[in-house]
Image (cartoon, grey):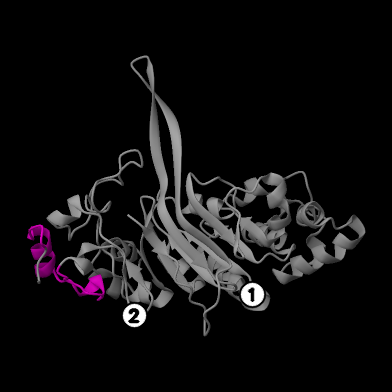
């Protein structure tokens, strides 16, 4: 089953992608001991994923923990090698480049990871931390690095007064800004943000999201924003790709995915977002997915989501749904659109209780045909 998120949509323009994954697969081989014997298991972390990011675009990648989101980010940065498929940056195939060959590209491809404290050496000052990538990637000497460090800190709302401080002297929000300054100091074209605000409180998250938007507008840097919270992703992204068990199941503009989801999994993720109005929250229909996420060592046949889908039909258990592309450029992989079809491009929100029951009871051929 192909998972596709390669429509390039930026505000007001269509352009060649800055970075691209083509039919990428990543398999981890693990050893599991049992009854005194070891056996090798194959875990499919990323399964036939294609996506692209245009210059200056923000692509949100969302899904539950263990869906493969972080692995996609690391594959795009070539921090992990693909098992199969192709990785491109600015039209160049970088899939098999070695560490020496990748080094000239590293300043163009930076990352901010979820564990902010773990990524900042507590024995180094803020000035040393921000200057380190300048010296390593661009050969900037200490004398010239000072001005660049101050500029980077001011860009993220800090000042030269923070240069001599240590990470443990700063708040969580300030450490997040340091991580951003460290990544942006080398003026990257692509920034992979892996759960960058999940450890922050709500008010600090809001500040970080606003900061990311301002920086992107100013610097024209592209983001791959990896997160599990669709509410935050909606505010950061131009487009959103929804990932489940190693595959991308839906792609669309941020507004389309957030307001009119086409895949049942996206609908379930959205239903988990609390509404700020208590009266509205009481009346909302919360979708509780039954069962656990299947193991990547034992991916279900057919549609990988059918074991938890409230609208699953018989065909879902046997046949992988083909990707369907719509006039607005969005894609979805779901038999509710392709077998029948029931939805035919409409939002899954239009399925009422009676229709949901009919979908669950439908024979292999679907219903509505």
Q: Which residue is mark 2?
A: 327
Viewer-proximal residue among 224 and 290: 224
Q: Is residue 239 visible?
A: yes
Which residues fall within the magenta stretch?
Answer: 340-365
Query: How far across and how far down the image is residue 16, in percent?
Result: 55, 73
Q: Could you say whether the residue bearing mark 2 is in a helix, strand or loop?
A: loop
**Above/below status of 343 relative to 29:** below
Q: Earlier in the sequence, mark 2 or mark 1?
A: 1
What's the residue at 63%, 45% (across, down)? Answer: 118
**Residue 92 x %, y %:** 61, 60
Left or right: 178 in relation to 243: right
- Residue lying at 42% horizontally and 75% vertically, measured from the top left: 253
The residue under label 1 is: 220
**Does the magenta portion include 279?**
no
* Looking at the image, residue 119 lies above or below residue 284: above
Q: Is residue 176 left or right of residue 229?
A: right
Q: Nearer the viewer, residue 314 or 16?
A: 16
Q: Is 356 covered by the magenta stretch?
A: yes
Residue 222: percent from left, percent from top: 59, 69
Residue furthest out toward the bottom? 12
Tell me: 107 left or right of 75: right
Horizontal side of 168 relative to 303 (left or right) equals: right
- What x and y, as percent, mark residue 105? 69, 57
- Which residue is nearer to you in this view: 170 or 250? 250
């Amino acid at each position: 089953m192909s998972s596709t998120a390669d429509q390039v949509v930026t505000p007001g323009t269509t352009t060649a992608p800055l970075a691209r994954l083509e039919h990428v697969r990543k398999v981890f081989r693990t050893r599991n001991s049992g009854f005194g014997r070891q056996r090798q298991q194959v875990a499919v972390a990323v399964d036939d994923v294609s996506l692209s990011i245009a210059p200056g675009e923000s692509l949100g990648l969302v899904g539950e923990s263990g869906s493969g989101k972080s692995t996609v980010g690391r594959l795009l940065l070539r921090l992990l090698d693909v098992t199969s498929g192709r990785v491109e940056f600015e039209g160049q195939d970088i899939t098999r480049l070695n560490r020496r060959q990748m080094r000239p590209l590293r300043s163009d491809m930076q990352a901010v990871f979820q564990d902010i404290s773990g990524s900042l050496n507590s024995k180094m000052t803020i000035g040393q931390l921000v200057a380190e990538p300048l010296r390593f990637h661009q050969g900037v000497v200490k004398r010239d690095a000072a001005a660049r460090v101050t500029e980077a800190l001011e860009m993220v709302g800090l000042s030269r007064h923070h240069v001599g401080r240590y990470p443990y002297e700063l708040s969580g929000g300030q450490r997040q800004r340091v991580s951003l300054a460290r990544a942006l100091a080398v003026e990257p074209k692509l920034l992979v943000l892996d759960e960058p605000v999940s450890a922050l409180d709500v008010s600090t998250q809001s500040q970080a999201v606003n900061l990311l938007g301002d920086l992107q507008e100013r610097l024209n840097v592209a983001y791959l924003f990896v997160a599990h919270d669709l509410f935050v992703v909606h505010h950061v992204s131009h487009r959103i790709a929804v990932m489940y068990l190693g595959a991308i199941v839906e792609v669309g503009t941020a507004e389309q995915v957030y307001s009119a989801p086409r895949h049942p999994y996206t609908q379930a993720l959205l239903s988990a977002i609390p509404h700020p109005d208590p009266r509205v929250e009481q009346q909302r229909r919360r979708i509780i997915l039954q069962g656990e996420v299947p193991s990547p060592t034992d991916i279900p046949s057919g549609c990988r989501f059918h074991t938890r889908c409230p609208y699953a039909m018989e065909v879902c258990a046997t046949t992988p749904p083909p990707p369907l592309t719509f006039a607005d450029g969005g894609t979805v992989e779901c038999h509710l659109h392709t077998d029948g079809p029931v939805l035919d491009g409409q939002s899954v929100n239009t399925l009422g209780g009676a229709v949901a029951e009919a979908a669950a009871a439908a024979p292999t051929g679907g219903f509505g045909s």
